[in-house]
Structures are given as structure tokens and as C-alpha cells.
Amino acid sequence: MTSINHVAIIMDGNGRWANKRFRPRIWGHVRGSYVVSEIVQAADDIGLRALTLYAFSTENWSRPLEEVSTLFKLLKKFLIKERQRIITNNIKFKVIGEVASLPEETRALIRELESITEFSTGLNLTFAFNYGGRAEILRAVNAFTVSHPGKSMSEDDLERLMYRPETGNVDLMIRTGGEQRISNFLLWQMAYAELYFTPTKWPEFGASEFKKIISHVSGRERRFGNVSGQVSLDQVVATAETNKSIYIQGASSNVQ
């Protein structure tokens, strides 16, 4: 049983993998799309509560038009190809980000699958498409300001207004491809996430390495700002009260 519940992945290295083989970058994205299905199945098999995949960032618009178009087509293909498996496996599916830029046909497929799986109780599968972490936070803050003018915002308020609050905080973020950045991905949710950077490029990534990483990170001590072996304030107070009582009893015995 793993202590890791929510895994986020930056699926990087598709283009470089293809270029190394003297193929166009889009060939790497096509090959990488098959890995997505394998990792989703692996996440479901090991009982993860949530898997969030960074499919397309707000910064990716600067890429060549052919590459952007291919990424859009691959999302549509995934929605069609994996639809029945997602439903059968009780997976709750959602796309986060500014999806208005997607073709209407793709948006319709997203709405349909989100609606069908709304009450699914298995893996929470999220695709971050045309997504940016800063934009998500700004969106939440602006929504709160409009609905609660003049009121201070709490962390709970902010979390409730994120794209997908039910997935909770990220326990582990994996980035493939060798780069060591989080690239504006789930900035709020990754405040205390464990980070794992693998040199393996996404088209070569697979279920075996995925499971090994989760097993490895599960062995880490996650202290969330505490120090190793730190006791709670309540424990300190209780110990002090016990010692005080023992001291008073001892002093009383000496007087007698």
C-alpha cells in the first residue's frame, strides 16, 4: 500500500526523442500518446486516487503550428479511443485549463466524458490542457473577489475554487526528459510535493519505471516543514504537565 495518492506528471521529451531518431517532433508526440494509455492503466491498477497529466501548457502556443495542431488531434483521438475503458474502469475524467481554444467537436467529447464519469468513484484522471498554474490561481482569486467583495480570502476558499479541488494536493510530481523545472504546473497543489526528475524521455517511459518511482518515493520521510522525529505541541504540553506533577509529588514527599 503506497502513501502516494496524487501523482502529477510533466510528459516531456517527445520532440527531442524524435529528433534524435531523425524524425519530426510530431512523431514523438504520437509515440508518447501510447504511453499515456499505459500510465493511466498502471495508475488505476495500483490504486492511485488521482493522476494529473500536463498535456499542453499556456506557453506551448509558441511552438510550431503543426506541432500544436498535432497535440490537439491527439487529445481528440485519446478521448475517442479510451472513452469506453475510462467508463468501464470507473475513472472520473476531467480536463482543466482554458479549453475554449479547442475545436468544438473536441470540447463536446470532453463535456460528454466528464458528464458520464461525474459520479465515478475510481481514479481521478485529469488532463491539464492549455493550462497554467499562475492563471489557475488568478482565476480562483478573481472569482472569489467578485462573489465576496471586501472579504478576506482563506486557503480553504482558494482551494475550493481551483479547477479540481477534489483531487487534493500533489504527493509526487514526476518530470520525464531530464529537465528539472516545474514549468508553471499545479503551483498551489505542489507546495509540499515530492519531486522526481528522470532522464527517460516520455516516449520511452513505461509502467515499470512509473511503479518503481512511486515505490522509491513512498520510502521517503515526508516532514511537511517539521524536523525528523518532531513531536506535536500537545505532546510537549502533556509531557511538561506530567513532569510537573512528578516534581510536586517528590517535593511533597521530601517535606514529610
Image: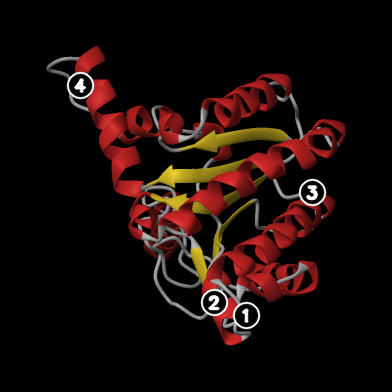
Q: What scheme was used to colour the molecule?
A: secondary structure
The residue identified by callout 2 is 177
The residue identified by callout 1 is 200
Which residue is rendered at x = 15% and y = 15% of the image? Answer: 149
- Indicate the position of residue 81 as horizontal and vertical percent values: 78, 41
Which quadrant is the N terminus positioned in? Answer: bottom right
Q: Which mark is residue 145?
A: 4
Vertical order, 136 against 207 (above or below): above
- Indicate the position of residue 63 as horizontal and vertical percent values: 39, 61
Q: Quadrant of residue 105?
A: top right
Q: Quadrant of residue 243?
A: bottom left
Judge the density around disc 3: few (<14), some (14-19), many (≥20) Cα neighbours within 10 Å: many
The residue identified by callout 3 is 44
Secondary structure of residue under mark 3: helix
Nearest the eye: 104 or 56: 104
Counting residues from the start of the chain, the first of labels 3 and 2 encountered is: 3
Which residue is rendered at x = 12% and y = 17% of the image? Answer: 150
Give the number of the mark in front: 3 or 2. 2
Amino acid type of disc 2?
A: Gly
Q: Is residue 153 left or right of residue 236?
A: left
Task: Determine contact: label 4, label 3, CB under 8 Å.
Answer: no
Task: Determine contact: label 1, label 2, CB under 8 Å.
Answer: yes
Judge the density around disc 2: few (<14), some (14-19), many (≥20) Cα neighbours within 10 Å: many
Counting residues from the start of the chain, the first of labels 1 and 2 encountered is: 2
Nearest the eye: 36 or 27: 27
Tell me if residue 165 can be seen: yes
Amino acid type of disc 3?
A: Asp
Q: Residue furthest right?
A: 88
Vertical order, 217 against 85 (above or below): below
